[in-house]
Amino acid sequence: MAGAAAGGASAPQENPLTDLSTFIAGLPKAELHVHHVGSASPRIVAELAARHPDSRVPTDPEALKDFFVFRDFAHFIEVYLSVVDLIRDADDVRLLTYEVARDMARQNIRYAELTVTPYSSTRRGIPDTAFVEAIEDARKAAEAELGVVLRWCFDIPGEAGLESAEETVRIATELHPEGLVSFGLGGPEIGVPRPQFKPFFDRAIAAGLHSVPHAGETTGPQTIWDALTELRAERIGHGTSSVQDPKLLAHLAEHRIPLEVCPTSNIATRAVATLDEHPIKEMVAAGVLVTVNSDDPPMFGTDLNTEYGVAARLLDLDEAGLAALAKNAVQASFLDPAGKARLAAEIDAYTAAAIG
């Protein structure tokens, strides 16, 4: 942690932010890969579980810590869907969305593209218009009251098949809420090939949405190639296995296709064995535009500030390096140019004040 991090020791009054965790906590940030239901804090999950006592989700926030320990990716999906089942009406949707924004505000997240899965709610009986109105109401309140700008990625839950893809693209294109900017694909990758979703991505892209599927999280590089060639991906969710294919890494770097990297998530779901083995170092070394994200933060016992701390250790970043990482997310976002310029300037001003 050389450079600015070391310089503060001799002049603590001029540069009080000598501790990287303090710097990270105050750093204005954007987050591009974070799930709506997966961001529900233990307090909110417990509250929802108490409202719906037929669920097997614990009502004790402490018990949720054990509940959120995953044997593998399949077990993670099982647990995740049990939490999804707690979102049963528009009031639940609105509560969850606003509280997620409140947690983001505490971390100085200024902008987030929240991955939302409408099908998970509409198939449980929430009308599509009520769902969209709930998230939009929460979005507007979060921006006005908390200073957090939210945008939506509507994603297909891949495990639910083509029916879910049809429903997701229909809601996206027919209702097209103001905050919607992109179209994604989540859920398990094994047994869920990307090419089958091409017609649905084609319709979303034709409606003006950006393509941001998950790929290469628990499968090999071919899944990422499929996302690029068949789904016309502009960013890749995770992309963990990209380092297995030098040609793919070179392609991502050359075309400035960002990766939405989620280190702690990859460990929690056993996609990567240990943090020290995480391929983020190889991605950066290859010149790929890397953003750092939290994915399903409370479920994985993390948040975006923690993920920046992980990145600082793995990539040996000082304050200036962390600021550059934050600006990667701004650059890779679907913010309008004026919004990008404002947030980048805020990051620069904060960093200049912090490190002198």
Image (spheres, rainbow, N blue to C red):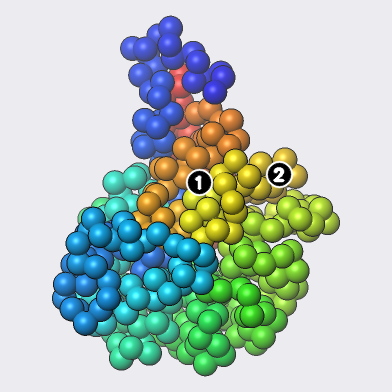
Quadrant in the picture for residue 38: bottom left
Q: Residues within 10 Å of mark 2 (few under 14, many from 20)?
A: some
Q: Is residue 266 visible?
A: yes
Vertical order, 41 against 340 (above or below): below
Residue 166 lies, in percent from the top left, at 53, 90
Judged from this view, the residue extending furthest toward the top is 10
The amino acid marked with disc number 2 is: Glu
Q: Quadrant of residue 266?
A: bottom right
Would you place residue 217 above or below residue 294 in this image?
A: below
> Residue drawn at (47%, 37%), measured in percent from left and top?
309
- Kind of residue at disc 1: Ala
Along the line of sight, which residue is nearer the eye, 269 or 353?
A: 269
Element type at mark 1: helix
Query: Residue visible at 38% across and 90% down?
Result: 123
Q: Position of residue 171 (x, y in %)?
A: 44, 86
Q: Position of residue 260 (x, y in %)?
A: 57, 56
- Of residues 79 and 302, the one nearer the viewer is 79
Observer able to see residue 173: no
Sequence-wise, the earlier of marks 1 and 2 is: 2
Does residue 183 lie above or below 46 as drawn?
A: below
Location of the N terminus (image quadrant): top right
1 or 2: mark nearer the eye = 2
Image coords of residue 268 (percent x, y): 48, 56
Tell me which residue sits at (67%, 67%) in the image.
219
Marks 1 and 2, Cα distance to the nearest angstrom?
A: 29 Å
The residue identified by callout 2 is 282
- Relative to residue 6, is residue 64 drawn left or right? left
Q: Which residue is mark 1?
A: 341
Q: Is residue 291 left or right of residue 27?
A: right
Residue in the image at 43% along x and 29% along y: 20
